[in-house]
Amino acid sequence: MKALIIIGAGRSGTNMLRDVICALPGFATWPCDEINYMWRHGNREEKMDEFSGEMARPEVCKFIRDRFAAIARKLSADFVVEKTCANSLRVEFVDRVIPEAKYLFIIRDGRDVVASAFKRWKAPLELVYLIKKARFVPASDLPYYSSRYFINRLRKIFSADKRLASWGPRFKGMEEALQKYKLKQVAALQWQRCVENSERGFQGVLDDRVCRLKYEELVSHPAQEFKRVLEFLDVDPAGVDLLKMTSGVSSKNIGKWRNKLSDEELQKDLLPLIGNTLDRYGYV
């Protein structure tokens, strides 16, 4: 069994990337969106999702690795593909757990991420989505997370701004940021922290274990980019119909921020916070 871990901020195309890859023979994943509850097992009392490498204690590593092995056996998978956006905050921890893993690191324009994430912060309850994820909460952790979920939903119902108490990867300082900044600014900081934490984490990972992708290139030239992904995984692309494989990939969401963010929001609220990170990746 080989582990392929997708790292990226929420709303960066991680779901699309996982789904396209898992349509190939020999690739499989969990039948739910994310398994953050599994990654947090043994560290569930931590309020934030930023974990240090030292938190990957032997019993934590064994629990998570056993789950990967179980999926590989159940689905007869050569590659187990995993995508949990919160892992972008704790790459060093993940790599301590599965030091042989390969990574796909995807980055998207933070302005598009903010516009998309803002909607998720105010999204209604999706019962089917919740049930799928609940199946993979470790039994001993279920009461703890059930109470937290209930509180999160109550906050949305009774708050004036009608937002969730928490959505997406929880970075250190997020609670303070929610008190200090507007919600779109918090979404921007969330994207920035995910991207920058990932970069720091990958400094300790050999380059031949990390394939970097830009969302905009991936959706604009999907066959070309997925060919590069397959070569990175030592899978012969000659045996894959790349056009068929990527037929559902669309570039229609590139630049949607232009219709979702006002110039004032961009110039006064967002660029002072994340302008340097956007510039680093060639977005401004």
Image (spheres, grey):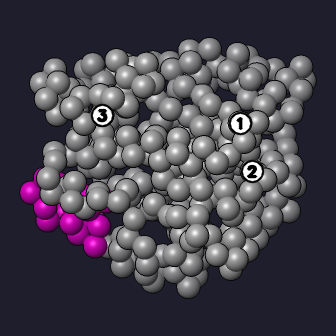
Q: Position of residue 187 (x, y in %)?
A: 30, 43
Residue shown at the point (28%, 73%) measured from the top left: 151
**Is 156 a magenta residue?**
yes
Residue shown at the point (20%, 26%) measured from the top left: 266
Tell whether 247 sits left or right of 33: right
**Residue that carries the numbered disc 3 in the rendered image:** 274
Nearer the observer, 88 or 206: 206
Is residue 137 visible to the viewer in this orientation of the structure?
no
Tell whether 190 sits left or right of 50: left
Mark 2 or 3, nearer chain start: 2
Q: Position of residue 133 (x, y in %)?
A: 54, 63
Task: In the rendered structure, find residue 207 and report the number of the disc placed on it.
Answer: 1
Q: Secondary structure at mark 1?
A: helix
Crowding at dot 1, Cα within 10 Å, few <14 / some 14-19 / many 20+, comes out as few
Q: Quadrant of residue 243?
A: top right
Q: Nearer the viewer, mark 3 or mark 1?
A: 1
Mark 3 or 1, nearer chain start: 1
- The amino acid on which the numbered mark 2 sits, given as a three-letter code, is Ala
Measure the C-alpha gap from mark 3 to mark 1. 26 Å
Magenta highlight range: 151-166
Crowding at dot 3, Cα within 10 Å, few <14 / some 14-19 / many 20+, comes out as some
- The amino acid on which the numbered mark 3 sits, given as a three-letter code, is Ile
Residue 80 position (above or below residue 142)? above
Q: Position of residue 69 (x, y in %)?
A: 80, 64
- The amino acid on which the numbered mark 1 sits, given as a three-letter code, is Asp
Measure the C-alpha gap from mark 2 to mark 3. 30 Å
Residue 234 position (above or below residue 155)? above
Q: Secondary structure at mark 2?
A: loop
Tell whether 124 sits left or right of 134: left
Task: In the rendered structure, find residue 101 and report the number of the disc placed on it.
Answer: 2
**Is 153 a magenta residue?**
yes
